[in-house]
Structure formats: structure tokens, C-alpha cells
Amino acid sequence: MISWKSVGADIVIEAIGVWIIATALSVTVQAQVIPTTRDSLQHAVSSHVPEAPMRSGHAALHYGWHTVDGIHLFYREGGPANAPTLVLLHGSPTSSIMYQTVMEQLAATGKLHVIAMDYPSYGYSDAPDHRQYSYTFDHIAQTVAHFLVARNIQQYTLYMQDYGVPIGFRLIQAAPNPISAIIVQNGVIHLDGFPAA
């Protein structure tokens, strides 16, 4: 069972939780796309080390790719690595770009470690053929779980929006202990929302 008062979650929920939600709601509407292409971003990262981070135009965040299950997954990350971690799961049809501004602001406080990845076929991540990669919530959740392990994220709060909610709930169901708290924005959070089809 997830507790809103879990160890470490009190910092996120009590100190800045409301601010996170308010900022994310206002930023989601105003999300801006970085004026660049995937090729130019990949060119900036060494082809020999796809996991190497690249700094954004804002010192608070850096970008990179991490290879998970043979897929190059793009991510944005910022804030002190030893601070409580907030994992942001994006919706569809967007990507981690929807959280760019709020992540910059949260990372700049120095009190929170933030990370968001682009799911396979979203944003700057690889788009494997559907005959080789099953695009189901179960499989995407498994890929996200493997990404978090690869990035050594052991304890975190989940911020979920839209498609991120069924993915995040699968993470919770598979391994609830690493999750300190959950924040849901505009997503289905009950079984009635999942039709039999």
C-alpha cells in the first residue's frame, strides 16, 4: 500500500507537492518544443557512448540516451542525484518535453532530482517495429522499469499524466516498495476506465 506520508515523500508532498501540481498544470498547457531535431541531438552525444548526458540550454537539466533492452531511450534529468527523485511519466501523443519547464524549475531548487524519459516511439527515443516490440501498457511499463533500474533509481515518487497513468500503475503493481508517493494529473485511475476492449 502506498502511503502519502512514506519516508521521503513528505518532502515532495508537504513541502512542494502542491507547487509541483500547480506548476505542471500551467506548464502542460504552454509546453514548448525545443527547436532542434533528433539527429542534431544525437550528433551532440558520442555515438560510442549513447548514455552520455548532454546539457540543455538551462543549467538545471541535461539530456541523454540510455540503451535499455536494445532500445535507445531519450531522457531529461536534473537536480542533485542524492535528493528525493520524482519520475515523470508523460502522456500521448507528447513526450517528456511536456515536463521541460517544470523539471527545470524543480531541479533549480536543488531539493529534488527529476527524470523523465520518452517511451519507445515517442519524442527522441527509438521506434522499434511493432513486430519486434509490443506496444502495450504492460510492455512499455516493463521498459520503463528496466530504464529506472539502468539509471539506478531505487526510491521515487511517480508523477503520471494520461498514458503515464496505466504505465505507472503497472509499475506500482509490479514493485510497490520503491514508490514513495503518487501524483496523478488527468488520467484514468479506476478499473471502470479500462473498457473490456
Image (cartoon, helix red, strand yellow):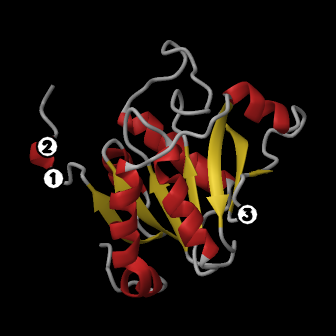
User: Neighbour class for label 3 at 10 Å: few (<14), some, many (≥20)?
Assistant: few
For the point 33% across and 65% down, the residue is 183
Q: In this figure, which residue is indicated by the disc labeled 1?
A: 190
Q: Amino acid at mark 1?
A: His
**Where in the figure is residue 158, as x and y percent of width and height?**
42, 63
In the depicted structure, whether residue 111 falls above or below residue 155 = below
Q: In this figure, which residue is indicated by the disc labeled 3?
A: 59
**Where in the figure is residue 166, as x and y percent of width and height?**
31, 46
Q: In this figure, which residue is indicated by the disc labeled 2?
A: 193
| The image quarter in which residue 21 lies | bottom left
User: Neighbour class for label 2 at 10 Å: few (<14), some, many (≥20)?
Assistant: few
Q: Are marks 2 and 1 in contact (CB under 8 Å)?
A: yes
Tell me the element at label 3.
loop
For the point 76% across and 30% down, the residue is 40
Q: Amino acid at mark 2?
A: Gly
In the depicted structure, whether residue 84 falls above or below residue 69 = below
User: In whole angstroms, how far apart are the C-alphas of marks 3 and 2?
Assistant: 40 Å
For the point 72% across and 52% down, the residue is 56
First of labels 3, 2 by sequence position: 3
